[in-house]
Image: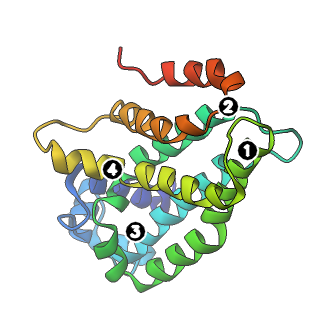
Amino acid sequence: MKTYDRIVQESLWLFNEHGERTITTNHIAAHLGISPGNLYYHFRNKEEIVYQIFRGYQEYMREHLRVPEHRVLEPEDLGRYLDAAFAAMWQYRFLFYDLPGLLARNPQLQADYHAWVRHELKPQLAHAFGEFAAIGFLAAKPEEILPVATNAWMIVKFWFAFQQTIRPDVPLTEETGKAGARQVLSLIKPYVQPQYMPVFEGIEARYRSQ
């Protein structure tokens, strides 16, 4: 693996484990066993590293939340979306522990994040929920689709940060996302059409604690 990619990968691990604010470029260089000068050859500062990590998260979300082009969306796709969304939140969780602060310290990240949410993410979520309504899976009026999609996204986006706040003595794990998925499903359940309830309950069962 190239040094550039190692810096991004290991910085992500360090930020997730110890918090972005506590990790400096010197910490990253020492962790990688390279000189600070070698790190600065690839990145001028920590903000550039954070920005590249965000771009990796962004590409993941673009790919996994895309509505299929060559087939009709199916109710089971709701589980696929939840799996992808919570997997991304776990992999990139440090981004959302203090998102306002992170954006304030990184103008390029702030501009790109806001543009992405406004012009890509929100329309993509509205499209997916609109397709669920179009196939009769959800009984949502057109004016309800974006608010429901937005509320679901807010749960996903801040779930790990919320759990860290209310249960600071309980270590977060990837399994923590299952409770978040259940929370999203509880939001969507009132909109599920009766004929699709068995399918929906099958999706719910995937996220029950063992």
Q: Quadrant of the C terminus?
A: top left
Q: Residue at x 35, y 19 (%)?
A: 209
Q: Look at discs 1 and 2 and give the one toward the viewer.
A: 2
| Residue of label 3 | 50
| Residue of label 1 | 133
Q: Look at discs 1 and 4 and give the one toward the viewer.
A: 1
Is residue 184 toward the left or the right of residue 149 in the image? left
Q: Residues within 10 Å of mark 4 (few under 14, many from 20)?
A: some
Q: Looking at the image, which is closer to me, 135 or 81? A: 135
* First in residue order: circle 1 vs circle 2: 1
Residue 138: give x, y in percent of width and height. 68, 39
Q: Residues within 10 Å of mark 3 (few under 14, many from 20)?
A: many
Q: Residue flagged by tag 3: what amino acid is it?
A: Val
| Residue of label 4 | 13
Instruction: Determine the CA span between mark 4 and mark 2.
Output: 42 Å
Instruction: Determine the CA span between mark 1 and mark 2.
Output: 9 Å
State whether residue 1 is above or below residue 71: below
Residue 192: give x, y in percent of width and height. 63, 34
State whether residue 105 is above or below residue 68: below
Q: Residue at x 40, y 68 (%)?
A: 50
Q: Looking at the image, which is closer to me, 49 or 132? A: 132
Element assignment for label 4: helix
Q: Looking at the image, which is closer to me, 160 or 21? A: 160
* First in residue order: circle 3 vs circle 1: 3
Q: Residues within 10 Å of mark 1 (few under 14, many from 20)?
A: many
| Residue of label 2 | 193
